[in-house]
Amino acid sequence: MLLVPIPEGVNWRRPPPVTLVLILLNALVFFGYQSGDTAREAELTRAYFQSSLPAVELPRYKARVAEEEPGMAKRLERAPRELVFVRMEGDGKFMRALRAGEVVKPAEPAYATWHEDRERIDAIEGRLSFRRFGFTPADPRPVTWVTSMFLHGGLMHLAGNMVFLFILGVAVEAPLGAGWFLALYLLGGLGGDLLQWAVDPSSTVPTVGASGAISGLMGLFAVVFGLRPVRFFYWLFVVFGFRSLRGLAVLPLWIGWELLQNLVARGHSSVAYMEHAGGLAAGALLGAIARHRLVAARVERFHEEREGEQADRADYDKARALAQKLDYAAASTVFARLARRHPADADMMRQWYAIARRTPQLPHYAAATNAVLGLPGKDAATRRWQAEVLAEYMRMGGVPAQLDAAALGRTANRFALSGLVTEAQAAADLLFRIDPAHRYLPAVWDALAKAFARSPADPASQASAKRYRTLIVARARARAQNP
């Protein structure tokens, strides 16, 4: 079973930093440190078959398998001895008995030689990354509780874990924050190790991989998203598709699946299902504490923003669909709603204006024009576009009184300060017609007077500069007389 969350409203283009660092660290450990395991494994295999061990151990291992798994015993008889050796080394139950002196007993004549060779082979095997830093329940060295999370059994193991780490990390790190996310990620991995140790404390088989910590993220995800609907991709045998489920509803499904897998495998799988279950349970418990005690306000703010983004996406899709049906008035109504929520979004304003200008006789055209004029306009391209929109509004018979005086005043001021003199004049004249006493007018007139004064050889420019200075003086006198 595969059940992967695909939460909407999450910015997939900018994944959180801790998630990326964890992925990079896992990759560096695998391709850097663990790449040396190939040579170490070759040395182990060569030393083993040059010793006395194969003649003593392999027949006894085959006999043990014949007693417990007759079908497997037949396959082992046809298998190369190297594969039999690998399977034997991975059989935790047999290796525990072997090292405890229950398979080759001290009373046997071959015991002394066997014991010496076995210690030498174990020493070589101990240099393998999974033996040195993997988590072994029978030898739970403190450092391995953490180091095991950054080791992997193969490229596919690494790739699968990193895909899930990316998906869950992108979804969970944002509401928790980088610091808490990292702490809970590691604690979730420790929770997985703890359950694995509690269930099989005598196991000598090391567990490696980020699966426990990633399972912790799954538990965190379920609790952080709670009863909010989340879109999931599911795959069960040959059935697959997408479905919206409550975040918390998938937690028992995830845990139940791991417990079922563990029951079916009955110790014959290399996958640590109980570690996954432990990570899920630990992640859910930690997530509940974090959500309600540690970062409650941050989580709620994240959900409010996410739901706002979902509403924006729905409105945007609706507006585009209405425009395609040539219902420009209805499309403009939806865009107006979006513009109120995002007044500085130039790209959205361009789309709204392109639709509203198709019906200039409707009030939405003036509203879209005002929204464009209200953009911050710090860059030259936006200022030029605002000038074009304003000029087009007047050419298409727009009513000056429907323009927003405050937006027009700020736009006129920006035009004047940026050297768009002609455009600033047009905007200032419109503003004067709409509101002769507007507070922006003196600043715009001053900027225009200074701009025209820079051309002393041009009588027309000097006349314009004088006119604007006169207007400024007249405004000052009017205010003095009517404070």
Image: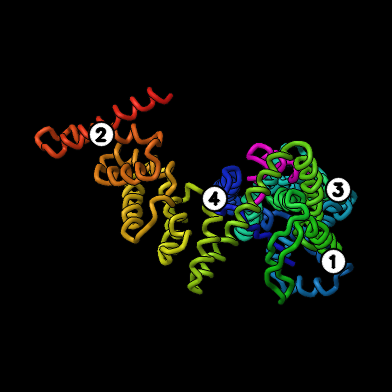
Give the Cα separation between the discs numbered 1 and 3: 21 Å
The boundaries of the magenta stretch are: 171-193
Q: Amino acid at mark 3?
A: Ser
Residue 94 position, x and y percent, is 83, 57
* Residue lying at 85% horizontally and 73% vertically, measured from the top left: 70
Give the secondary structure at mark 2. Answer: helix
Seen from the viewer's position, the closer of residues 450 and 61 is 450
Give the Cα separation between the discs numbered 2 and 4: 35 Å
Q: Which mark is residue 468?
A: 2
Label 1 Cα crowd, 10 Å radius (few <14 / some 14-19 / many 20+): few
Mark with earlier residue (1, 2): 1
Q: Which mark is residue 340?
A: 4
In the rendered image, which residue does mark 1 sit on? 264
Question: Would residue 128 be seen by someone viewing this image from the given angle?
Answer: no
Mark with earlier residue (1, 3): 3
Give the Cα separation between the discs numbered 3 and 4: 64 Å
The structure's colour scheme is: rainbow
* Residue lying at 81% horizontally and 45% vertically, measured from the top left: 285
Image quadrant in which the C terminus is located: top left
Label 4 Cα crowd, 10 Å radius (few <14 / some 14-19 / many 20+): few
Give the Cα separation between the discs numbered 1 and 4: 57 Å
Give the secondary structure at mark 4. Answer: helix
Residue 439 position, x and y percent, is 40, 33
Q: Amino acid at mark 4?
A: Arg
Mark with earlier residue (2, 4): 4
Seen from the viewer's position, the closer of residues 72 and 130 is 130
Q: Amino acid at mark 2?
A: Tyr
Give the Cα separation between the discs numbered 3 and 2: 92 Å
Q: Amino acid at mark 1?
A: Val
In the rendered image, which residue does mark 3 sit on? 202
Mark with earlier residue (3, 4): 3
